Amino acid sequence: MTLKLRSVGTSDRGLIRSGNQDAMHSGAWLVAVADGMGGMAAGDLASRIAIDAVAPLDVETPEDALVAALQTGIELATARIHQAVEEDRERQGMGTTLTALLFSRTGSCLALAHVGDSRAYLFRDSILKQVTRDDTFVQMLVDQGVISPEEASSHPRRAVVTQALQGEQVSPSYATMVPRVGDRWLLCSDGLSNVVRPDTLTEVLRETPDRDACARRLIDLALRAGGPDNITVLIADVVDE
């Protein structure tokens, strides 16, 4: 049995923003979502730099080199963002989230890298699990027991990110997992996760097997919920070929 990753991605500006600061990569070995911040032009640039830095990882990679490859990609993104800020001081403060999943050449392992508040969810055996942890002020309050997860979803400071790729030292989280046939991964920017409930995400992922239709349906739901932010959705299925 040879497991493969099959992915599609789509992005929408939303109903409020004048442009789209999200960027993504949907490939055979690598899927990634980045959500830029720090002003229109700078946010666009930061997210694109991050995706361009990790995109070359979309190649056959040995299991024992997955995390190191992602680390190298993030280090390159950090250096390039730092250089971009040095070239134009008005870009000071620009940054981007990054959530990336890299599949091994044998299909026996995958690695996940994450910084910021974009998310990776795993839909397995009809159960949806948020695999990444938000690098946000409200998540810190939840971890400390100050507020509940329900209160976090409507907290006025829920958009405050505590860590992002901004050209300085950063501490991304990394994880490795063993994929299974039938696994479905959802990577998204907070334009989806902030406005569409997890139970709704679960329903759509379960009832819409076609990847393109699933991604489009999730975008539509975010738009119906007001589309206050850019929305990026990436669906990746683990299949047996």
Image (cartoon, grey):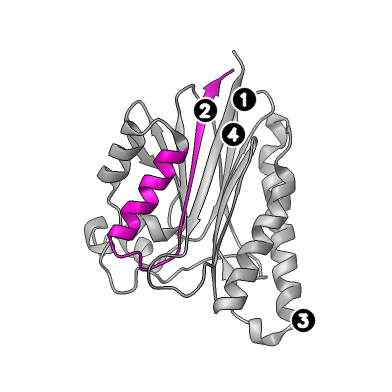
Q: Is residue 94 visible?
A: no
Q: Residues within 10 Å of mark 2 (few under 14, many from 20)?
A: some
Type of residue at label 3? Answer: Glu
Numbered label attached to residue 87? 3
| Number of marks present in the image shown | 4
Question: What segment carries the magenta color?
Answer: 212-241
Q: CA distance from mark 4 to mark 3?
A: 36 Å
Asked if marks 4 and 1 touch (Cβ < 8 Å), the reply is no
Q: State the image coordinates of residue 189 (x, y, percent, origin top left).
A: 46, 57
Q: State the image coordinates of residue 66 (x, y, percent, origin top left).
A: 68, 38
In the displayed structure, would residue 30 be above or below residue 230? above
The foreground one among 171 and 238 is: 238
Type of residue at label 2? Answer: Val
Q: Secondary structure at mark 1?
A: loop
What residue would you read off at disc 1?
107
**Which quadrant of the view contains residue 121?**
top left
Q: Secondary structure at mark 4?
A: strand
What residue would you read off at disc 2?
238
Please tell me which residue is depicted at 65% across the width and 60% down the height of the picture. Answer: 50
**Which quadrant of the view contains residue 22?**
bottom right
Asked if marks 1 and 3 touch (Cβ < 8 Å), the reply is no
Q: Residues within 10 Å of mark 3 (few under 14, many from 20)?
A: few
Q: CA distance from mark 1 to mark 3?
A: 41 Å
Q: Is residue 81 left or right of residue 227?
A: right
Type of residue at label 1? Answer: Gly
- Which mark is nearer the camera, 4 or 3? 3
- Which mark is nearer the camera, 2 or 4? 2
Please tell me which residue is depicted at 63% across the width and 40% down the height of the picture. Answer: 27
